[in-house]
Structure formats: C-alpha cells, structure tokens
Amino acid sequence: MQINLKQGQLQQEETELLVVNLFEGAGAPGGALKAVDDALSGLVTQLMAAGDIKGKLGATHLLYTNGALPARRVLITGLGKEADFSVSVARKAAAAAAKHARDLGVSAYTTIVHGAGRGGLSATDAAEALVEGSLLGAYRFNSYRRDSGDKDTPAIAEMTILEADAGKLDDLRAGLLIGQAVGDNANWARDLVNEPANYLTPSELARRVREQAERAGLQVAVLGEAEMAELGAGSYLGIAQGSDEEAQFIVLEHQPKGVDLANVPTVVFVGKAITFDTGGISLKPNLNMWKMKDDMGGGAATAGALVTAARLNLPVHAVGLIPAVENMPGGDAIKPGDVVTAMNGKTVEIISTDAEGRQVMADALCYAQRYNPDAVLDIATLTGSIGIALGLELSGLFCDDDILRDRLLRASEFSGEPLWPMPVWKPYRRLIDSDVADMKNTGGRYGGAVIAAMFLREFAGEQPWAHLDIAGTAWQEENSAFSVRGGTGFGMRTLFELLRAYATG
Ligand code: BES
Ligand code: MN
Ligand code: ZN
C-alpha cells in the first residue's frame, strides 16, 4: 500500500472513501465529522441521536454521500472514550477503518489523522499510529488462494492522509515514514508465520530474510550445519539432525551509519525459528499440529525488527540471531535420553525432543556473547504452558533486570502488544537437575513456562537478559475488528520500539 500525504479540505476531496472519526460519548459531531454532518444536512447528528453511531473503538459506520460531498462514501471509525485514548487506540481505530475499506474492495481511500487534535497525540505519533494501524488492518494472507482472497477484496493500492493545516505536514511525514517501515515489516513477519512449512523451509526462510535484510542495508551471514559444528553448537545440531532440511543459523547485524559503534549500545535479539515442530520422536498429537508452522514466530519478529531498524537507521548497534531448524522424527533424529553439549560446554539430557525450542535457543544465546552485548532479548513460541497461564492475548515477559523489564513494558505499551511479567524463579532450577548431565530439558508438568525460562537462563550470559514467550500470541484464532485470523507477527513492533528506546538513550 502506498501512503500519500496531502494538504487540503475534506469538502474538496474526491475519493471512493473518506475516513473520519468519533469519540465515544461525544455529544455532537466535531472537527472533520462536523464538516461531514454539515454537508449531509445533519445526518450524522441524527444517527448519533438515535444511538446508531456510538464511537466505540473497533466499530465503523459507513455512509453514502449521494453527491453531497465529492467523496463517494464516508466511514466513521470509533475512537472509544476520550479518557482511554492513546497511541495504541489510534492505531486500532485506523486498523478497523482499513479492514473495513479492504472488505469494501476500494482500491484507494483518504483518511484524516486520528487523535492529533482532541486526542492530544503529537502529529508525529498520530501519523505513525495511523499508517501502522492502517497497514496492519488491511493485511490479508492470500498467497495460495487462487479463486478467492485477492479476487474478492484486492489489496488497497493507496491511502492518502488529508491534513488541513500545512504547518503539520513535516511532523506528519516523519511519523508516516516510521509507521510505514514498522507496518510493512510487521506484515512481512505475519507473512512468514502464515507461510506453509513445505514452502518455508529453513533455507527458504534464510533466503527471504537475506533478501529483505540486504535491501535494508543489514549485514547478513547464514551459517550452515558444518559451521555450527565447528562452533560446538551440539544442542542446536541435535535438533537439526532429524530433518532432511539443513538448519540455517541466520545472523543479521545493524551498524548504524554516521555514528561511532563504540558510543551506542549493543542489543542482541534471539528469535526461535522452528519452521515446523512435529515434536520429533516425542511426536505431538495430531490435533492442530498443522499450526506448528507458526513455531518460527520469534525469528520472524526478530527479522522484522532488524530490517526496520536498518531502514530507519536507528542509532543503536542491533544484532538478530535466528536459528532456523525443522524438528522432525526419523532414523537420524535425536532421542529421549540422549545427551548433547552446548556451545558454552554445558551438557543437556534430552527428556523430550518436543522441548526443541530451548535446545536451539541455548546455542543461539551462547553465540550472542561474542557481541559483548548491553542487553540480550530472546523471543520464542516456547511453551504451551504460557497460553495456559496467560491466555492468548498476553505474552510472558521473563526478566530479572529491572531496567530492561521496565523498558520492555514501556515499549509494549506503545506498540500495543501486551506483555505480562512472569517470574525468573531460582528455586525451580532444581526441577531440571539431571542424573547424567548438567541439566535435563524438561522439568515436569507444572510451571512449564517458568522452567523453560530457567533453562534458557543457563545460556544467557551475565548482561541483562529478557525472554518473551509468545507461544500463545504468535497466532490469532479469531478475526477481530482490527485484524484477521492467522500469524500476528507478535513482538516485531515491541522489539523495534525497544531499539528505539536504546537509540534515544
Ligand atoms: N512449539 C512448542 C510450543 C507451542 C505450543 C507453541 C503451543 C505454540 C502453541 C514447543 O516446542 C513445545 O512443544 N513445548 C512443549 C514443551 C514440553 C515438552 C516441556 C510444550 O509446551 O508442551
Ligand atoms: Mn516442541
Ligand atoms: Zn517448538
């Protein structure tokens, strides 16, 4: 979707669809909606008085202008209650409008900016939220739908932001560029998650990530299995050995232009990328196994965040490590009871080959140490247990460093991807004590997400470290007012936001 910015009056705007907004509880139409109401001889006032348009967040109301305005249709998107308004709300209101626009099948539409006036957002934040939300809301995954999908509701080619005040255009454009980079890359991450695992093998993931990353100016290296063997990544390779697909260890590095690397913080992201998780010899049950194509959601979020940081040349040294592996059973596969040695020399007894995520993340976390990082954040669809604990909208945040945890919570508040603090609880370390190795890879039925975090901690190094368990949130089961069922790209926008926080000190 191309995004344009234009100075003008909505009374003169010729378009298939014009998006305006309404706060819930507003007594009478104001601002742009007032101009629409005037042109339509009080129709909006009547609809509001009848209670047909309430301005609830997520609600959209379509009107036909019947020639009273050069715009053919007007769409009113709800902003919710004024007291609850925020960047996240503005993003959602834009997403709901874009989703409705896509369902209508319009090829181009015009929108005003939500929340820069009465909502109290800066013009830059408001434009960023508008563009990002619109891209997220208009998203569909139609790559394999030959007779439906894009044929019914083609992708929207253009969105135009209309602003009456010429003095705001520069700030709006700054926000537009950020919102576009973030929105496009979040949608790219969703594409990667939605991609079937027969297409998106580790090699194909590496190819696609390389393509986008090089275009954005990142340094890219992809290590094969032989190179990882030289590094002693036995934990990672143990999982890789059951698949005919060669594992690919993807390394992305953003070295900002025009700044001395020594003067900026180094942040390393590690994103789990199991392109398909069968469970291996500890085979998963049949029910919903197909969804395990989303087990590379952490890797997708990591790649998206790095590409965005490079596009916007954020003044921060950022590294993304994406261990891409397929977890398969087979004659060569790792077995329960086997022992592997990770890059840091620690040995692990495999109890379940379905706890493969922590095995590949272990070596990737060790690899992160070579950058002497100021912070390491890993993101993984790690445990079904986190979904049991927090449900399907919250991701678990495990972090025992107060500063990093607060930074992440603030980033998450801005991005609208909710995180909930979970314990890094040392007494549970004993639950992964092994009789034959330094640790075992599972620790019983209860507290599975916490135990998994305690396992990762053994490999995370001494610097501040955080772990996001996105097993419940990488995939969305239901369509909502703001987005469609399928891969969410969860974490991509929060990771980017965290980099922004490091970049601004
Ligand atoms: N990829 C799964 C976790 C998962 C579960 C992701 C549900 C998305 C939805 C992970 O590799 C896994 O299988 N974890 C096991 C760990 C157990 C064997 C200790 C689990 O959660 O059951
Ligand atoms: Mn598994
Ligand atoms: Zn997995």
Image (cartoon, rainbow, N blue to C red):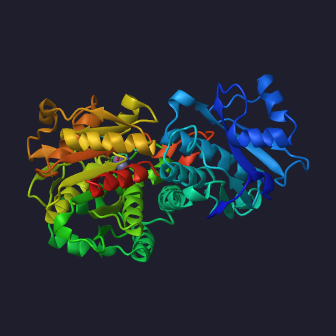
Where the N terminus falls, by quadrant?
bottom right
Q: 257 or 38, which lies in front? A: 38
Residue plotted at (52% across, 61% down): 170
Instruction: Tell me where residue 256 sits by quadrant.
Output: bottom left
Instruction: Tell me where residue 35 sits by quadrant.
Output: top right
Residue plotted at (33% across, 39% down): 409
Instruction: Tell me where residue 149 sits by quadrant.
Output: bottom right
List x then y, in percent, for residue 269. 28, 57
Is residue 388 shown to the viewer in this render? yes
- 366 relative to 137 in the view: left or right: left
Is residue 442 shown to the viewer in this render? no
- 71 relative to 461 in the view: left or right: right
Q: How many marks?
A: 0
Residue plotted at (81% across, 23% down): 50
Q: 390 or 355, which lies in front? A: 390
Please, is residue 62 above or below residue 110 in the view?
above
Please, is residue 498 above or below residue 144 in the view?
above
- 429 relative to 158 in the view: left or right: left
Q: 158 or 116, which lies in front? A: 116
Residue plotted at (20% across, 71% down): 260
List x then y, in percent, for residue 232. 14, 66
List x then y, in percent, for residue 341. 13, 57
Toward the right, the furthest residue is 66
